[in-house]
Image (cartoon, helix red, strand yellow):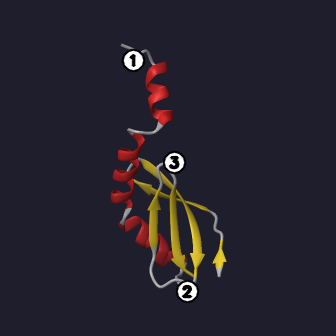
Amino acid sequence: MWIDGAMKIIDFGSRRIKYNLHRENRKRLRIVVAPELTVDVFAPTTAGDEQIQAAVVKKAAWIARKLDGLAKYHPLSAGLARTKGNIG
């Protein structure tokens, strides 16, 4: 069973991390940080919202590092740098 989820947000310092919550028949929580700079959380259908949020908060530093690392290669980030006058 797959229940497509809603957009959720956690605060990590001054940063807000948005993630899509998906509930599935699974045993463990899975967090995926995609190259498109999206975060998907796949959680067991039996897990409570507070449990899921606590797990995501616990991994927030890891998620932020992955997003920052992927942002270096994201075409949108490079385009913004060029429009700010950083052309050599």
Can you say which quadrant of the picture contains the N terminus? bottom right
| For marks 1 and 2 on the same chain, the one whose residue lies earlier in the sequence | 2
Vertical arrangement, residue 2 with respect to residue 74, above or below: below
Res. 75 mark: none
Task: Look at 51% across and 67% down and name the residue there.
Answer: 41
Give the residue pinned by disc 1.
86
Task: Look at 52% across and 53% down and name the residue there.
Answer: 38
Q: Nearer the viewer, mark 3 or mark 2?
A: 3
Give the residue pinned by disc 3.
36
Can you say which quadrant of the picture contains the C terminus? top left
Q: In the rendering, at what x and y percent does residue 65 appear?
A: 34, 51
Vertical arrangement, residue 53 with respect to residue 44, above or below: above
Give the residue pinned by disc 2.
46
Q: Nearer the viewer, mark 1 or mark 2?
A: 1
The amino acid on which the numbered mark 2 sits, given as a three-letter code, is Thr
| Gap between marks 1 and 3 measured at Cα | 23 Å
The amino acid on which the numbered mark 3 sits, given as a three-letter code, is Glu
The amino acid on which the numbered mark 1 sits, given as a three-letter code, is Asn
Numbered disc 3: secondary structure: loop
